[in-house]
Amino acid sequence: MSEARSENSASNVAVFDTHPSDAIDAESPLHWSRQRGVIDAAAGEGQVTVVERPFLGHLILRGGAIVLDEAVRETLGVSLPGQPLGLNHDADGSRSVQWLSPDEWLVIVPAGEEFELENRLRAQLGDAHFAIVNASGGQTLLELSGEHAREVLMKSVTYDVHSHGLPVGKGVGTVFAKTSVNLRRPREDRFELVVRRSFADYCVRWLLDAGREYGLSVE
Amino acid sequence: MSQHNRLNQGGRIDRSRSLSFTFNGQRYQGFAGDTLASALLANGVDIVNRSFKYSRPRGIIAAGADEPSAIMQLGASEAAQVPNVRATQQALYDGLVARSTNGWPSVQRDVMSWVGRLGGHLMPPGFYYKTFMAPASMWMTYEKWIRKGAGLGRSPAASDPDIYDHLNQHCDVLVIGAGPAGLGAALSAARAGARVILCDEQEEMGGSLLDSRESLDDAPAADWVAKAVAELDAMESVTLLPRTTANGYHDHNFVTLHERRTEHLADTAAGAGREGEVRSRLHRVRAEQVVLASGAHERPLVYANNDVPGNMVAGAVSTYIRRYGVVPGQKLVLTTNNDHAYRAALDWQEAGRDVVAVVDSRANPDGELVQQARDSGIRVITGSAVMEGKGNQRVSGARVVAIDTPRFVVTGSIEELDCDTIASSGGYSPVVHLASHTGKRPQWRDDLLGFVPGEVKGMHYAGGVQGIYALDESLADGARAGAEAARAGGFEAAGAMTLPAAASRRESATEALYQVPHEKTSLRAPKQFVDFQNDVTAAAIELATREGFESIEHVKRYTALGFGTDQGKLGNINGMAIAARCLHRSIPEVGTTVFRPNYTPVTFGAIVGRHCRELFDPERYTALHQWHVENGAEFEDVGQWKRPWYFPQKRRADGQERLETMHEAVARECLAVRQGVGILDASTLGKIDIQGPDAREFLGRVYTNKWAKLAPGRVRYGVMCKDDGMVMDDGTTSCLGDNHFLMTTTTGGAASVLEWLELWHQTEWPELQVYFNSVTDHWATITVTGPEARKLFSEVTDIDLDREQFKFMDWREGRVAGVPARVFRISFTGELAFEINVQANYALHVWKTLFAHGEKYDLTPYGTETMHVLRAEKGLIIAGQDTDGSVTPEDLGMHWAVGYDKPFAWIGKRALNRPDTAREDRKQLVGLKPKDPKVVLEEGAQIVLDPDQAIPMTMMGHVTSSYYSPVLESGFALAVLKGGRKRMGETVYLPMSNGTTHEAEVVSTIFVDPKGERQNV
Amino acid sequence: MFYIFCPYCDERREEEEFHPSGQAHITRPADPENCSDEEWGDYLFFRDNPRGIHHELWVHRLGCRKFFNITRDTTTYEILETYPMGERPTVTAERAGVRQEQGVQTADGGWQTVGARPENSKLNEETPS
C-alpha cells in the first residue's frame, strides 16, 4: 500500500496518488457516450473532428504568480503565463500551463505524471502559501479541429472564437450551451475544450448536433 | 385567373419561372422573385383579410414590414403552420399555401358582419372592456369567440418538423439595413478594415435602390447595388445576411437577428429539399458599434374610407410597379403632402395606365418631381386632398376637396374623381424601433415631421432613420456613419470613400397634414382609419381624448392603437397627431412612443434554437451511470444530475413476471440496508478541497460548530448558516492534514457553497490564507452500508477495519479493489457505513468488484428514494427539503452543533441571538406518526390543532418529509410545528383538500435506533 | 444582456458568465456581538435601490470565479466602471451630482424612497460602510 499512503511533506497537506499500481480498467468521462453509441453514430465526413484526450494529468495550482512561476519553470520547464488568459506550452506541446484567475492556473501533463509533478512542486514551494489540487478524474480534454471548427463553436459558446478574440496561446472559461467549459487555442488550427466529467456527455452531444451540417466526427 | 395586373416587362422577377400557389383555397400563378403580396396583386386579388373589429374587407396597403392587413397563416400541412406572416415579406415559392388570418369563415362573406354593421357607435373604444367584462365569469367564453371571429392566427397542433439554431456572432460594426445608407456604411466600415455584419430583412440587399427611379453613375441604381454587394461578399471580414431581420436591440449593443434560411423556398426545410437543415437561425450579435440604417416608413393620410381595398401608400405602388412589374389598378388618384410621393404617379403613368390626378395639399408645390408630373400631362390639384374614398369591395372613386390644413376645415366644393386606386402619402416616419428598444425616447423634429432616434451609446444613424431621404445625401450619410463607427471601433479608413454619382433634386417642403378634414365631423363622417390592424379610427382617438385620456400611452391602451404584430408602424404618428390636435397640443407634448422587441414576429423555434428535446438541459452523469442504466434503474432528476431513484427488480406473481412497483422496490431496498448490506452511488455530493494554514480558522467561521481540534483522520458533521442565522447547507468535513480539509455539501448546494466560501474569503477575510477548489467530479463516491458492510468491505480492501482502529467518524487511506481510495466512516442511513472515494475513472471497476464479492451478502443497490426513507427514519435532515431558508439550527434541534462560545462571530451567530430567532414558539422540527399506519402524509400538508375550526384555520406548521417505513410498518413524517418540541405526544390534524383529515402524534424525529448504536458497531 | 468588463480577466464578457450578488460595499459590522438588533437588521436586510448610479457586487462565476464591483446607472443600464475588491468607485452619485435629483436623500442616511419613510428613522440609518 505504499503509493496509496500520503507522502506527508512538512506542509501538513495530504497528497495522494490516485492511480493503482496494477493494470486496472479505467473509463474516461466519455466512456458511457461511446458505449451507448452516441459517438459511434456520428460517422461524419470529417470537416470537423473532435478527439478526446482522456486520462491526462490535470492539476490546479493556487498561489502567488511570482512564487509559482519559479517552481513551475524549475519542474516543468514552462513559465507561468503572466498575463490574464495566457496559455503556455512546452516545446513538444504535451505539457501546458493556463491562467485561470489571478491566483489560479491549470497544468495539464501526460497521463500519470501528475502525482510526481505535484510532489516536485510541493518540494520546490516549501513553506510558501499555495495549493495544488488534482483534478484529473474530474475533467477531460477534447480537441476540435477542421475547416468548420469555428462555426461549430459559434453555435456553442458565447465567446468570440475568431482569431481576434481567441488567438493562439489564449484560454478562457466561458459559457457552452447551458453549461460552461474551459476553451483554449493551442494552435491556429485547433481548439481545446476542457470539460467537466459529469457534463462531458452533454457537451459531446451538443457538439455532434452543432456539427452535423459539417459532418462532425468524434474519436 | 390570369395575372392581369402584371406588366410584360420590368421588375426583378423571372417571368420564365412560373410558381403556383393557393390563397384561401384558390389556385394562382406568380413568378420567381414575387412576394406573396405582389403575386396576389398581379392576380387582381383585392380582399386579403377582414378587419379585426368591424370585419371590413381589407386589401394590401404596403409593400414591406409596415403592412398591417395582409397577415397570413402559412403552411400546407398541420405541422408546418406559421401564423402572422406578412404577405409583403413572404417570398413566393411553388406550392405555397396561404390563408387569411382574419375572416373566418371566409373573407368574402363573413358571419361577423353583425358586429361590423352594428359597429360604429355600438363599438366605441374600450368596447371590449365595457361590454364583455360582465359577468366576469363569462370573459373566457367571450374572448374565445371574439378571437375566433377576429382571428389572430393559430399555432400548429402538430410537432414542428424543422430545426432552428443560434449562432453567437461578434463584430466591430453591425450595419442594419442594406439600402443606400446601409450599403454606404458597410462599404466604408469594411474598407477601413473592420469586421462587419450587414443584415437586411428583404430577399435581396438594396432596399429602396431596388425600385428607385434614380440612377447611380448613370446606370440603374440596382447595378450599383450588385457591385457593392459583390465587393462586400468578397471580403473575408464581412458577413452578409440577407433575409435577416434585426428584431431586438438589447443592452450594450447586443442585437438579435432572425435569419430565415428556408422559408423562402418551402414551408419546411424538407419540402425545400434541405432535409435536416436549419429553417431559421437566431444570430446573437455582440457588436462593438451598430449602424442603424433602417430607413423610413411612409405614412398614409387619414381620410374617410381609407381602408377600402385599392387604398395604398404611395411608395408601395412604386415598389409593386418597379420591383415586381405589377400595377395594382387601372386609374390612380394620388393624394400627398410632399414631393417624394409624385414618383408613384410617374411610375404609374410610365406603366401605361391612367393617372387621374395628383391631389396635393400644398398651395404652391414647385419641386422638380412636381414639375416633371406636370410636364408629363398629369393633372395636379393643389391646396386639396382626398377627403373620402368611395366603394365597398374596391375603390370606385375619390372625393376631393380644397382644405385649410392649419384650421382643419374643408374650404371648397367637392369634386368626385373616378378611380380604382388611391395612393396616399403623408410624409415619412423614420424606423426608430430598434433605437428605442432599450428605452431611449425618440425625439420629434418639426422640420422632418417625424421622430428621430434618441442617442444610444455605440449606435450610429445613417440615412432615412434620421430623416435624410434624398439619395445622394443618404449614400453620403451612410459612408460617414460607417467610417465613424469603424473609427469608434479602432479602424481608420485610408481616405474618403468615392460615392457613386447621384442626382440632387430640389424639393418643396412637406406640409404637416395627417388627417384630412371632412365635411362632417370625425364622428359622423365615414370611418377614417388610423391603425388598420386594430381598427382604430380618428373618431376613436378623438373620443378617447374627450373621455379624459391625455397621454398617448393611455390613448394607446384605451383604443388599441399600435397593438398587435403591427406595433403602429403606419398608424402611430397619425394617431398622435390626431390626439395632439384634439388636445390643442404639439405632438411631442402628447408623448412619444417607445417600441419593444420584436420588430416583426419571430417563431418560437428560432427563440428556442437547439435547446429542446434531448438538448433541452444538461444531463449530468456520474462515473457509474452506465451500470445504473444496465441494471434497470429508474432515474430521478436532482438538479441536472440523473440519480438512480430505485432499482425495480423482476418479480413473479400469479405465474406472471412483472417489474416491482416503486413502493415494493423501496421497501426491499430499505430492508436490505437495515438487515444486510446496500450500496449507493453518492458521487453527486459536492466536494470541496480546502488547503492553507488558515483552513481550520475559516471552517470555524462558516460552520456553526467547532473545528479547532478536529485531528487528521477525523470527520465532523457541520451546519452552515447564512448571516441571518438560517440553515443554508450541511455536510461532513474531513481533516486530511492540519492544513488540508475535504468538505462535502448537498448535491444541489455544491456550486453555491463553493461560491459562498469564495464570497466570504474574497470580500470579508482576504487575509486568511486558504484556497478552495471543487473536486466534485474528480472523486466518485460509493457508500456501502448495512450490518454486513464490514464483512463485505473487508474482502476488497487492505484497510484495517477493526472497530477500534477505524472508528465511526474516522477516515482512512488504502486500496479498495486495488484502487487507491479514501474511506470515510460516516453514515446517512444510521447503519454501519463506509463511504469510498476513488478517482472517478476507476469507479466502475471498484463498483463491479464490490458486486462480485457482494453476491453472497445479497448486496443491494439502492437509490435516492431509499436513501431518503433511511435518513428520515434517523431524523437526518436534507437541507432544502426539511429547511427552507427560515429554519435555524435550533429549530432543527441541533443546539449540539452550535458553538456559541467559539471566539469568532461566525456566520449566523449574531442572528441567532435576535429576539425573533430565540422565540420558543418558532416552527421546530418534529416527527409525526400517523394514527393510521397505512397513511403516508402528503409532503407540504398543513398542520392544525383543531380539526373543527372554520376556514381559515390556524396553521401550525407543515410536513417536510414523509414516507412509508418497511421497518416500522407504518407511514412516518418529519414536520415543522410551532413550539413542536413541547408538543411531544400531542395529537395534531392534517386536513386534506379532499375533505378528509388525518390524525398524527407528535413524536421524536428519530424513529429507528434512537441511541445511534447501529452505525457505531 | 450586459457586456461586462472583468477587471481580473481584463476583457469584456457576456452577462451569462456572471452573477450579481447585490449591493457592493456592504461591510459586516466589525463587532457583531455588540451590535444592536437594529444595526444588525440594517446590515442584513436593508439595501439601497437608487434610480441612477448604483454600486453592485458581481462574480465572474463561469470565468475566473472572482468577485468585483460594478458602478451601474440603473436608468440607462450603462456600466460606468468595474473595479476589483478592496477598491473604491471613482464614479459616485455624489460626484455625478445626480443623487439629489434622483430623489435619494443621503442626508438622512441611506433612505431611498421619498414618501415611504417609516416612523423610526433610526431603522434606516446607514450602516458604517
Image: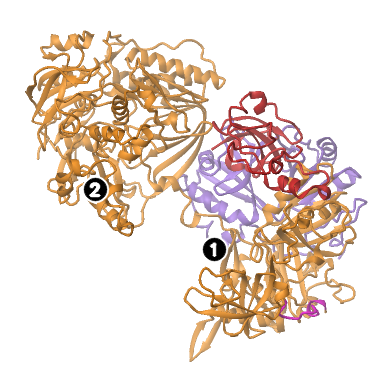
Chain colours: A purple, B orange, C red
Q: Nearer the viewer, residue B578 or B11?
A: B578
Q: In what quadrant of the picture does the N terminus of chain A appear?
A: bottom right
Depicted B708 relative to depicted B810: above or below: above
Q: Is residue A4 left or right of residue B682?
A: right
Q: Disc 2: which chain?
A: B
Viewer-side residue, B637 vs B731: B731
Q: Position of residue B841 (x, y in %)?
A: 69, 60
* Farthest front residue in view: C119
**Residue B11 appears at what percent x and percent y?**
21, 26
Q: Camera-side residue: B350 or A133?
A: B350
Magenta region, residue range: B1006-1016
Which residue position is annotated with label 1?
Answer: A36
Q: Tell which subunit mark 1 falls on.
A: A
In the image, what residue occupies the spot 51% across and 14% down? B493
Secondary structure at badge 2 equals helix
Residue type, mark 1 in image: Arg
Neighbourhood count class around disc 1 (C-alpha, 10 Å): few under 14, some 14–19, many 20 upward: few
* Residue B307 or residue C102, whichever sits in front: C102
Q: Which of the two discs, 2 and 1, sits closer to the camera?
A: 2
Give the vertical position of B158 relative to B113 (above or below): below
Main SS category, magenta section: loop
A29 vs B708, left or right, is left
